[in-house]
Image (cartoon, rainbow, N blue to C red):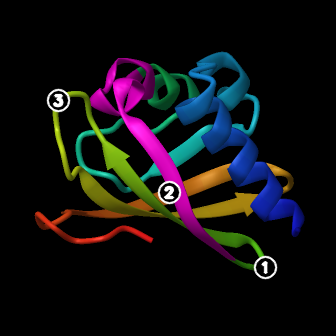
Amino acid sequence: MTTAKKIVLDCFENLFVHKDFVAAGVNVHLDFVTHSPGFPSGRDAFVEAMRTSPMAGADVSVKRVIADEDHVVVHLHVVPPGEESGAAVVDIVRVEDGLIVEHWDVKQPVPPGAKMF
């Protein structure tokens, strides 16, 4: 496993599995930039926004991870409480000097009856 991939997966596991937002922040640069509409940049602001977002209570499963040098792509299936199908989410993360420094994402609802594998 590449170092960048391990850093991103550690952060995501702390965010979405353990709900340990302080531990997740350890992997994020202080001047982190997100290009995700509605989420603030900066490590502390981003981690706090994640803590209070619907993602915090969702069932999140990693479907695949692709790493290319300092970029990691994570395909997630996110099902918020009370929803049946949820959404497919692809996060693109850039790692520099051992910390997550930049993030992009795309999301789409999972159509009824579709299989997420």
**Which is more foreground, mark 1 or mark 3?**
3
Q: Classify residue 14 as left or right of residue 1.
A: left
Amino acid bearing label 3: Gly
Mark on residue 69? Answer: 1
Q: Quadrant of the C terminus?
A: bottom left
- The residue closer to the viewer here, 59 or 5, is 59
- The residue closer to the viewer here, 102 or 19, is 19
Q: Earlier in the sequence, mark 1 or mark 3?
A: 1
Residue range (magenta) = 49-66
Estimate the x, y position of residue 105 in percent, counting from the top left.
Answer: 38, 61
Distance between mark 1 and mark 3 Cα atoms: 38 Å
Q: Residue at x 50, y 57 (%)?
A: 103
Say if 96 sits above or below 34 in the image.
below
Q: Secondary structure at mark 1?
A: loop
Instruction: Give the image quarter of residue 84.
Output: top left
10 Å crowding of disc 1: few (<14), some (14-19), many (20+): few
Q: Residue at x 24, y 28 (%)?
A: 81
Distance between mark 2 and mark 3 Cα atoms: 28 Å
- The residue closer to the viewer here, 62 or 84, is 84
In the rendered image, which residue does mark 3 sit on? 82
Q: Secondary structure at mark 2?
A: strand
Estimate the x, y position of residue 61 in percent, counting from the top left.
Answer: 50, 50
Amino acid bearing label 2: His
Amino acid bearing label 1: Glu
In the rendered image, which residue does mark 2 sit on? 103
